[in-house]
Image (cartoon, rainbow, N blue to C red):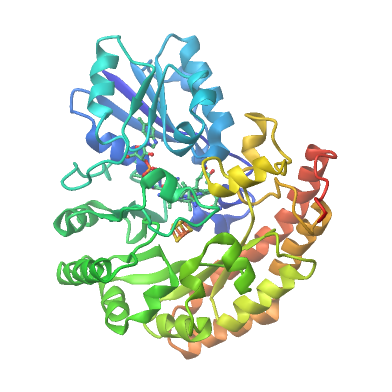
């Protein structure tokens, strides 16, 4: 039995525009979901993973599969449906799973043979068995899986072409920020994989550098932090010789022992959501952790960096409290906090989030011609109507934010400070140049987007 697992492309997503900027090679990440599915698949199935980020293959010249499995973020949905249509025309059954299939079940059900909602671990074997017998059900719900002792992901597949490997050590996030789909999809209960499994799986990864995909690497409670420390100790002891980056909240900085152990285990960079430079903005987003009294972001960032760990700060533009000037204000805040890279994104109502419900109720979703418009749900296009910012206004704010933070003098200052602190000046330079290059691409992308969206953005004014 032959199974193709496919990660559809979205050419609009800047992080995969490898041809336009070779720096982007460092920003193409492995579709771990498909490697996990492959790991759950019994040996009688011959599995191939296709990552269309490296170009879509000519499927008609490939051997006919018995089953096709497609994953998709919302931004990949259109291409997912094209791929599904191709195989369904040939009479090959298509099953789709992942975040978009879960949050937009009815839309997806119309376009594929079977949908898996939630996490796949508990239902995938049943799906394969039903497919083998020709009796696929229309829907399977995996819910929240037990992740203790699941088979390891297939790191032998997708073996070349990536700068980073990928692994997951925990699932879920208790914080439930209004714009994020993680709590809705993976639950508020923080689930941790057994440390021995994580270490074993790390050993299977061929790349020297690894993305730890956890949404919240160290969790929120003392017992989560204790487990994170145990994991880092075990990784250091196993002498894995990997360098890894991860996503975490700012509380990562609050424990010196945790930082020292993370660095010893190979942590070289963290991606932290600062989201807004103002307390009003943080309250709007429900980003409780960043609001803790006495929180000094500059000192927190510095503490992390002292352990040789780079900090990428993420911010959102387009909140209801954001007025003209917000772009520059974010760039100044990020510079003041001392982050090594700034990743600014447009506030985007993703299906399944509280933000989606609110914006939909207020008729503020400007790009709502679905499924076609999903391709713009990359957080890199302003798809909604923003309170104080018109379409031109918010695009200008984004450009002004990036232009300020990624001005050549500021880049050189950051690289110099990295050099002085004996951190990673080269990585910092590559990261900064990659963002700077995308600034030019974004200017054109916003002009094309404006043309595409026509007059669908009318800024909502306060009554
Ligand atoms: C790593 C990651 C990335 C990486 C790698 C992406 C990749 N190629 O896999 C990078 C940095 C590239 C990335 C980019 C983006 N990401 Co991202 N990313 C994640 C993250 C943190 C982890 C994904 C992961 O690997 N999880 C581990 C695997 C094992 O879990 P999984 O993917 O959920 O798969 C399980 C199930 O969903 C299911 N399943 C999945 N696919 C399939 C397919 C079949 C056939 C079946 C049966 C089951 C199944 O089974 C799996 C095992 O249980 C998630 C958050 C999250 N917790 O999922 C956000 C997340 C997926 N990203 C998100 C977003 C918005 C983006 C971007 C659009 C925006 C951005 N700038 O970050 C871009 C766009 C990328 C694109 N190609 O279009 C959103 C997606 C929301 C949505 N509705 O689309 C998420 C949920 C985060 C959030 N804040 O809400 N991302
Ligand atoms: S802390 Fe991060 S992962 Fe958790 S809900 Fe907020 S944005 Fe999502």
Q: x and y percent of residue 184 in the render?
A: 43, 45
Quadrant location of ligand 2?
A: bottom left
Image x and y of residue 159, in percent: 33, 45
Residue lying at 69% horizontally and 35% vertically, measured from the top left: 368
Rendered view: 303 above or below 396: below
Q: Residue at x 21, y 45 (%)?
A: 152
Tell me: 233 left or right of 444: left
Tell me: 384 left or right of 69: right
Q: Which of the pair 35/124 is nearer the observer?
A: 124
Camera-side residue of 126 and 160:
126
Quadrant of the rendered structure where residue 38 is?
A: top left
| Residue 420 image position (x, y, % from top left) | 49, 90
List the single residue furthest toward the front: 463
Which of the pair 417/22 is nearer the observer? 417
| Quarter containing the N terminus | top left
Q: Is residue 157 visible?
A: no
Judge from the rendering whether residue 350 lies leftward or rightward of residue 376; answer left or right. left
Tell me if I can see residue 19 in this picture.
yes
Q: Residue at x 66, y 41 (%)?
A: 361
The image quarter containing residue 439 is bottom right
In this view, the residue farthest toward the bottom is: 420
What is the quadrant of residue 196 in the picture?
bottom left
């Amino acid at each position: 039995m032959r199974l193709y697992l496919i990660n559809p492309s979205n050419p609009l997503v800047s992080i995969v525009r490898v041809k336009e900027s070779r720096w982007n090679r460092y920003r193409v990440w492995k579709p771990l979901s498909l490697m996990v599915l492959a790991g759950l698949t019994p040996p009688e199935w011959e599995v191939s993973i296709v990552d269309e980020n490296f170009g879509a293959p000519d499927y008609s010249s490939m051997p006919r599969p018995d089953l096709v499995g497609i994953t998709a973020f919302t931004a990949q949905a259109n291409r997912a449906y094209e791929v599904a249509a191709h195989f369904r025309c040939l009479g090959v059954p298509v099953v789709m799973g992942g975040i978009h299939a879960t949050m937009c079940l009815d839309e997806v059900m119309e376009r594929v043979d079977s949908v898996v909602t939630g996490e796949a671990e508990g239902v995938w074997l049943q799906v394969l068995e039903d497919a083998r017998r020709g009796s696929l059900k229309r829907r399977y719900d995996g819910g929240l899986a037990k992740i203790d002792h699941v088979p390891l992901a297939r790191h032998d597949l997708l073996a070349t072409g990536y700068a980073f490997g990928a692994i997951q050590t925990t699932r879920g996030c208790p914080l439930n920020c209004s714009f994020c789909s993680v709590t809705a999809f993976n639950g508020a209960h923080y689930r941790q994989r057994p440390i021995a499994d994580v270490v074993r799986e790390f050993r299977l990864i061929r790349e020297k550098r690894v993305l730890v995909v956890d949404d919240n690497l160290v969790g929120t409670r003392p017992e989560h932090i204790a487990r994170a420390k145990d994991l880092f100790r075990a990784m250091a002891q196993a002498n894995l010789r990997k360098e890894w980056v991860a996503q975490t909240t700012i509380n990562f900085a609050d424990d010196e022992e945790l930082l020292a152990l993370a660095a010893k285990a190979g942590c070289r960079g963290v991606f932290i959501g600062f989201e807004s430079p103002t307390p009003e903005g943080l309250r709007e987003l429900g980003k409780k952790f960043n609001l803790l009294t006495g929180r000094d972001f500059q000192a927190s960032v510095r503490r992390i960096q002292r352990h040789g760990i780079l900090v990428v700060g993420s911010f959102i533009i387009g909140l209801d409290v954001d007025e003209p000037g917000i772009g520059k204000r974010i760039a100044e805040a990020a510079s003041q906090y001392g982050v090594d890279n700034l990743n600014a994104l447009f506030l985007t109502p993703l299906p399944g989030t509280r933000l989606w419900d609110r914006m939909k109720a207020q008729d503020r979703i400007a790009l709502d011609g679905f499924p076609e418009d999903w391709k713009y749900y990359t957080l890199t296009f302003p798809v909604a109507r923003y309170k104080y910012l018109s379409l031109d206004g918010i695009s200008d704010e984004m450009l002004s934010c990036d232009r300020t933070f990624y001005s050549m003098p500021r880049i050189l200052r950051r690289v110099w400070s990295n050099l002085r602190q004996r951190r990673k000046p080269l990585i910092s330079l590559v990261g900064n140049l990659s963002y700077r290059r995308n600034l030019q691409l974004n200017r054109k992308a916003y002009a094309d987007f404006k043309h595409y969206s026509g007059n669908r953005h009318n800024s909502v004014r306060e009554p």
